[in-house]
Image (spheres, rainbow, N blue to C red):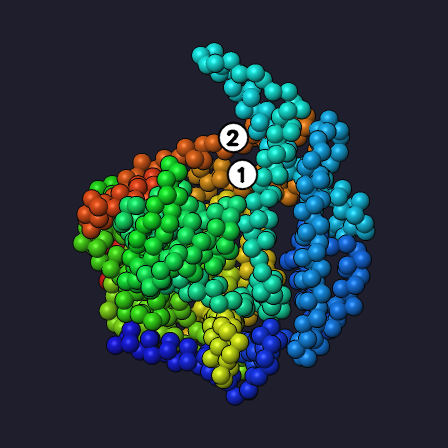
Amino acid sequence: MKRNYNILILMLLLAFASCSFTTKTFSDPNKDKLLIQVITYVLERGHFDPKDMDDAFSAEVYSDYLDQIDPLKQYFYQSDIKEFEKYKTEIDDQLKALDISFFNLTHDRLMQRIEEAKVIYREVLAQPFDYTIDETFDSDYESLDFVSNKKEMKERWRQRLKYTNLANYDDLIYAQENAENNAENAEPVEPKSLDEIEAESRKETLKTIDIYYNDYIDDMERKDWFVVYINAITQEFDPHTTYFAPEDKEVFNQGISGQLEGIGARLQKRMDNIKIVELISGGPAWRGKELEVGDIILKVKQEDEEAPVSIVGMRIDDAIKLIKGPKGTNVYLTVKKVDGTIEEIKITRDIVELEETHAKSSIVTKNEKKFGIINLPKFYADFEHYDKLNAAADVKLEIERLKDQGMEGLVLDLRGNGGGSLTTVVEMAGLFIEQGPVVQVRSTDEPKEVLKDTDKSITWDGPLVILVNEFSASASEILAAAMQDYKRAIIIGSKQTYGKGTVQSFFDLNRMIRNNKDGDLGALKVTRQKYYRINGGSVQLEGVKSDVVVPDRYSFIDIGEKDQENPLSWDEIDAAEFSFWDGYFDYDTTIKKSNERMRNNPQLKLIEENAKWVKERMDEKQYSLNYEKYKAKLDLNEEEAKQFDEISNYETNLTFESLPYELRLFEQDTVLKDKRIRWHESLSKDVYVEEALHVLEDLKASYTIKKVATIKD
């Protein structure tokens, strides 16, 4: 009953998100203007904390948009900026008037400047770089001014390309020195002069930049740049309010559900060719065994068409549209194989599970006790077939499988989990508590809503540890906060999680237009609510504070919500009614013991020192363009980095095993087997997982003592 109730609530929410603003008639025939009209209407009436679209708002959009389209200040001149500045406080007025002249001006100028830049970088790379000169490259683009003339622009490109080329130059020198040192048993090779090496390095740099412009910049159409402009507007409201073009909307849906319909191959464009770079385990292409990584797709033919369509030189998004398709349909690919032969391969499309998105589990034995670990990369859900695919149901199944193997404690790994479905996280919390509130949600000027687990059944009532880091966000924070407030689990990880305390809804913009004849308008993800812990606090900006704080490689890097542009503020509301978990585990003593272990752990001290060292390197903005100085700095960095080699050599002496159902799958799926082997190897070197198991042991040991003490009292 609980699941059906949650699905009903979800469908009502989606219906509201689709049609609650359709009282206004939108009729502008120009698609760009229509899009502006619909989006600004939704933002003004649907955002949790709507902003006044005034001159100050306009100035922020102006600055952020220019930063996004020319972040390195390598295209526009001061004269361009002077021309643009007359619009600095007029964008708000243009939005109200459905005027896109500022975008048209900047887009046309950008296209012109990009073509000029292609000429400039080729001219620069046609001339030798003198690496004996003592000069410096400044990578602090934010502090740089726009150049005033073409001479300055060429000099800016020269310095950046000279620095970029240094890596290729050094690699080629190293390769030659290495070849000379190992030439005893090989055919003698005529060494190249430094001038020849320098020329070869520039050729490699030119090839790399040509690929970037050919495969990415040149593939961007006007509509793609218009999306950048739209999102400069939407993200002034907050960093999570985002416009999705039609193809981006589909990618987002795939990410949420963890599955797609197609052939199950990851593609990449390289110099007009669409190349296969990965076959997804279990997918149609992988099962067929005819396609290989490295194959180039030349043509695509649908089963109801006679002639194939060439995709050579096609935008990769357009090529993917041709290759993907509904389950059960056939697609015929003309492929240039790795060995140079040409073949036509028939593939029947199917549902492709993006396995790396879904829950996976393993058993680990420690001191003759069996513990379980579940890794959950995302709180995924297929809203159209929720009963068949959602993370809560999958985690429940993994717990049952682990229990069958005699699990005595569970580690739920949410590190790097950026969130997902709110409905799913409420259900998942219910796996660990009898019943009660999980999260509080508040909309603008409306009373709070308490989302509860109403199912009295418990899937796992034993010791529970949740692993988090700075990238654990949104739904991950909801679950970690709820389990912490109930004193149901011990949270181990970074000082705080990401700090995203907002809830977004998707608005299908097509449903807001009666008789839309302008094509797919895409969707708008809008921040509609803020969520709060059951104790009344918010995770917005502050995140969830770990019970046991452990340093990691991101400890000193600005990556949280508080470091983003325009985040909503922190606040708090009244607590919900709830009672602490009565599981007879001594959480306070266990946390104290864990913190003591962590303070004295040499591996963690080394990780913290490495994190500080990496932060120092990231903060460097000045680089010598003199090769001798560059090489000396490089050698120094490599020497300093050696002190951190022991981090990757760490071993926990723990052995991880796949569950019986996966062992049976391995007989047919060697790719899955290899993935699990790599995962288990990573776990066996993971100091955080090692400490999580120590904590589970301590919790398990405290159970009998505390239960007896409680009964005596």
Name the residue: 44% across, 12% down. 185
Give the quarter of the figure containing the N terminus.
bottom left
Name the residue: 76% across, 42% down. 155
Outermost residue on the top side: it is 184
Local packing at callout 2 (Cα closer than 10 Å; few below 14, some 14-19, many 20+) is few
Asked if residue 511 is positioned above or below residue 272 in the image, the reply reads: below
Label 1–label 2 contact, CB within 8 A: yes
Give the quarter of the figure containing the C terminus.
bottom left
Residue type at mark 1 is: Glu
**Looking at the rendered structure, which numbered label has been put on residue 149?**
none
Q: Between residue 651 and residue 273, name the one nearer to us.
A: 273
Left or right: 373, with 270 as reference point: left
> What SS does tag 1 mark?
helix
Name the residue: 28% across, 39% down. 655
Q: Between residue 339 and residue 146, name the one nearer to us.
A: 339
Local packing at callout 1 (Cα closer than 10 Å; few below 14, some 14-19, many 20+) is some
Q: Is residue 610 visible?
A: yes
The picture places residue 585, in percent across and down from the top left corner, at 30, 57
Left or right: 297, with 328 as reference point: right
Asked if residue 683 is positioned above or below residue 489 in the image, the reply reads: above
Which residue is label 1 attached to?
A: 609
The picture places residue 453, in percent across and down from the top left corner, at 32, 72
> What SS does tag 2 mark?
helix
Residue type at mark 2 is: Gln
Which residue is label 2 attached to?
A: 643
